[in-house]
Image (tube, rainbow, N blue to C red):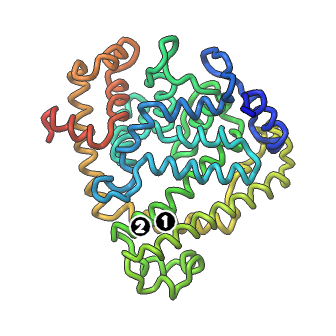
Amino acid sequence: MMLVRAQIEKMELDNLAPYAALSCKSRGRIYALDEHPLRTAFQRDRDRIIHSAAFRRLEYKTQVFIPHEKDHFRTRLTHTIEVAQVARTLARNLRLNEDLTEAIALVHDLGHTPFGHAGEDVLDELLQRQGGFNHNRQSLRVVDILEQRYRDHPGLNLSYEVREGIVKHETRSRIDAPGFEDDRQPTLEAALVDIADEIAYNSHDIDDGLSAGIISFDDLVASDFFVELVGGETLRGVKSDDDFIRHQLVRRLVDRMATDVINETFARVKQFNIHDLETVRTAPEKICAYSEDMRSRVRQLKSFLRDRLYNHARLVSKSQRASEIMTAIFDRLVKEPLLMPVRFQKMLDDESVEIVAADYIAGMTDRFAEKVYGEVGGG
């Protein structure tokens, strides 16, 4: 028998934890929308995100390594898919809303620039007088304004809960977005995506770093964490192209962190007497978290990645190239805004030329930015 929306909503009520976010109790959308007969609000959000142009462009945006250097390197799209996979696993084990979790995971990086975090840093510096650049805020602009798919409203018109997941996604700096109750915790589904994002990039950056030959298995032997995961003798002297050991390490890394999060989150649910969504929102601290021991180990892992991978000369030189490309494009567009597509030119009636130029540049893929760079006289 075919499932209809009302039946799916009833299944959520019957099967999800009492503190899960329910699609039938969504706070709604900016623009009124009739309910779909078959899909819940969060399922529609997921579908709208996947069909957006911004989502497709993630395929050609850098995660850490330039994608065309090696076919197997993660892109911003494959990173997003891995985050969604980890987040759904966490949500299912915690009896949370998988559809909401997946939608937030799929949307969380739509505002990312070309050339990875280096590109974000460049735009942040160029927009200091306009309040800087933050990819979370940009993701919200993408889904609320920049995506143009419907005649009767701008953006994708996503539900409050998915948009809240964007606003409250943890980054280096919080963003100011009125209407999202900054003093209250987000849903556990949104919190899960934060930690799934970290699990995904920590593990796949190790994977890609080994594959690229920038870090070696001998480097990992110096860390008690990796030795415990796989065994010191297993790692010592292993060649960087040993795919089986590399895959085994990454699998265990993901499994160890994810299992720890599930156990710790259940413990905190009991500790803080979380019995409905309101107690989630008023909790004194994060409910979805690592244990204290794992939190310490993850800090060590991130420090290792920063020292041995992200600050490697090979990646730093690419960051400098990204800065050169994006600065040249930005300066030219600010001086000659008519070089931008017509729909961006129309935005100049309501926005500064700097903000509109940043909107256009942030949406570019790496290869399109390289192309534009050549056309504006930089390449």
Cα–Cα span, label 1 and label 2:
6 Å
Verify CB contact (< 8 Å) between mark 1 and mark 2: yes
Vertical placement of residue 117 versus 346, above or below: below
> Which residue corresponds to the image point at 43% horizontal and 63% vertical from the top-left?
306
Quarter of the N terminus within the rendering: top right
Residue 121 appears in the picture as rendered: no
Mark 1 residue element? helix
Relative to 345, 8 lies left or right: right
Label 1 crowding class (10 Å Cα cut-off): few <14, some 14-19, many 20+? few
Relative to 221, 185 lies left or right: right
Residue under numbered circle 2: 307
Q: Which amino acid does label 1 sit on?
A: Ser
Relative to 25, 146 lies left or right: left
For residue 303, the mark is 1
Q: What residue type is labelled 2?
A: Asp
In which quadrant of the rendered view does residue 294 lie?
bottom right
> Which residue corresponds to the image point at 45% horizontal and 66% vertical from the top-left?
206
For residue 281, the mark is none
> Which residue corresponds to the image point at 53% horizontal and 85% vertical from the top-left?
232
The image position of residue 293, as x and y in percent, is 67, 69
Residue 101 appears in the picture as rendered: yes
In which quadrant of the rendered view does residue 217 lie?
bottom left
Quarter of the C terminus within the rendering: top left
